[in-house]
Image (spheres, rainbow, N blue to C red):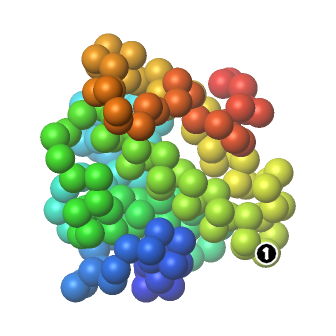
Amino acid sequence: MVAALLLSAQSLTGYTAPAAPPAIAFLPQGELALRACAGPCAVYGWFPPGHTIYLDERLDPLEDLQARAILLHELVHFLQQENGALAGPRSCRTWLKREHEAFEVERRWLIAQPGAGGAGGLARARAPRVPLGRFCRDEPPAQEGAKALPARLPGPADAIRPR
């Protein structure tokens, strides 16, 4: 299943195949949150630099489409790393570009899955609930001539209200 998802991610991004797939490790949610956020947070998957994707142990990608979508999202981050995409200084804007691409690939993949409900189903439910652009408020504006990032992500996230 990881190989099939990796092929889907490659097809949707255009990134080349890595030398080897990443390891997948399942962690208790509390430990995952501590590693990914340094404290409590609503994280289900995380890919730090390296070759291991961490998933919440409550997820079952073999049986659950939404869990597979989360794994696909993290595989996009793995491909970004392996292809040197969006390389450069670690900044909020770079993180935002990585997340935007991963959510867009996840959305497109979900729309194509039987039983996902198309654009109005799981693809919409998995969109970021908080506009990711809000996280970069404190960074200086992009340099002149650089493509500006939108203040918020367009699309399915606009139709979802935080709970």
- Whether 29 is drawn above or below 92: the answer is below
Residue 33 visible? The answer is: no
Query: Which residue is situated farthest in the top direction here?
Result: 138
Residue identifier under label 1: 114
Q: Secondary structure at mark 1?
A: loop
Residue 95's spot in the image, x, y percent?
33, 41
Residue drawn at x 58%, y 35% as measured from the top left: 153
- Whether 28 is drawn above or below 6: the answer is above
Residue 49 visible? The answer is: yes
The foreground one among 149 and 75 is 149
Query: Which residue is situated farthest in the front direction here?
Result: 145
Residue drawn at x 47%, y 69% as measured from the top left: 13
Residue drawn at x 82%, y 51% as measured from the top left: 120
Residue 105's spot in the image, x, y percent?
55, 61
The foreground one among 119 and 144 is 144
User: Three-letter amino acid code at disc 1?
Assistant: Pro
Crowd around label 1: few <14 · some 14–19 · many ≥20 (10 Å): few
- Whether 112 is drawn above or below 33: the answer is below
Compared across the picture, whether 40 is left or right of 81 comes to right
Q: Quadrant of the C terminus?
A: top right
Compared across the picture, whether 98 is left or right of 121 comes to left
Residue drawn at x 28%, y 74% as measured from the top left: 22
The foreground one among 67 and 149 is 149
Compared across the picture, whether 47 is left or right of 103 comes to left
Q: Quadrant of residue 122?
A: bottom right
Residue 29's spot in the image, x, y percent?
40, 45
Residue 11's spot in the image, x, y percent?
51, 78
